[in-house]
Image (tube, rainbow, N blue to C red):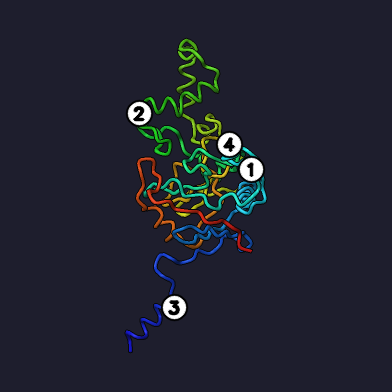
Amino acid sequence: MWSTLCAFLLSLSPAVGAQAVANDEPENPVCLIKTSMGDIRVELLPGEAPKTVANFIALAEGAKEFTDEQTGEKARRPFYDGLTVHRVIKDFMLQGGCPKGDGTGGPGYTFADEINAEALGLHKLKVLQAGGTAHRNLGVRSQQDFHAVVLQPLLRKLGIRSQEQFDARRDDVQRIVAQMTLKECYENQGYRYTASLKSRPPTRGCLAMANAGPNTNGSQFFINLIDTPWLAGKHTVFGKVVEGMEVVDRIGVVPVDREDKPKKPVKILSIRVLR
């Protein structure tokens, strides 16, 4: 009798890993991403990234004109239908939304990031840590990396273009770098932030815009398999998975080639807002 009761109770419970996550805001739109490996429901966050959400919905539902990569002509149809998850990196993220299927395509236009650096705490994190090492979120592994990520953008901002100019202002440069925050470092790279927005860090299950640098958003997006604090301030987070994270995890371990492309295509069948 006890085993029968346990089986009955288990039949009423959702499968392990398939539990739904409550919406942050009940009025937020939820989109259904149908893939060849299962369905994923994502809560979109218009209060945090209004233009990004509007662009995503309009492309998904065929309400926005884009440039067809195949013909070069203007088109208006559900953009994501039939595309693939073209990039999967285990224990990192999965990426889709490229009409070329290789990460180089888009809708024929770009738009600005929607990020509040201070909401992410980037104004409190220093570039240089104790012992003079670079903050781990910068991904600096060598002097060459430090020059490219921190020094070169700063020297460009200061108008220093020669060794002679650098030698004359060496003390100033050292002082600035010693006090520099991650927010300031990213601003030197070209990122611009909006203090009036709410922003959340790119954690596991978040939906964010993939890009090629500051203000180069288009159609490509990624879903995180893990927390990725090193991406904070560089990618607009505009949604979170509320159901189907087990599908995301299954996609996250598919066999891939040397370019991180799934060997067997993972199709995006459609993306629609549930109304």
How packed mark 4 is, by other alpha carbons closer than 10 Å (few <14, some 14-19, many 20 or more), is: some
Is there any visible trace of residue 47 in the rendered image?
no
**Left or right placement of residue 27 versus residue 155 in this view:** right
Distance CA(mark 3)–CA(mark 4): 47 Å
The residue at which mark 1 appears reads as 66
Provide the residue designation for mark 2: 142
Q: CA distance from mark 3 to mark 2?
A: 54 Å
For label 3, the SS is helix
In terms of sequence position, does the residue under pointer 3 or pointer 4 come before the other?
3
Whether residues under marks 2 and 4 lie with C-beta atoms below 8 angstroms apart, the answer is: no
Task: Say which quadrant the N terminus sits in.
Answer: bottom left
The local crowd at label 2, few if under 14, some if 14 to 19, many if 20 or more residues have their Cα within 10 Å, is: few
Q: Which residue in the structure is indicated by mark 4?
A: 215
Image height of 153 relative to 77, above or below: above
Q: Which residue is mark 3?
A: 12
Between residue 69 and residue 259, name the one nearer to us: 69
Tell me which amino acid carries mark 3: Leu
Q: Is residue 10 above or below residue 168?
A: below
Q: What is the C-alpha distance between the residues marked 1 and 3?
A: 45 Å
**Residue sitting at x 51%, y 33%:** 186
Counting residues from the N terminus, which is met first, the one under dot 1 or under dot 3?
A: 3
Comes first in the chain, label 3 or label 2:
3
Nearer to the camera, 21 or 69: 69
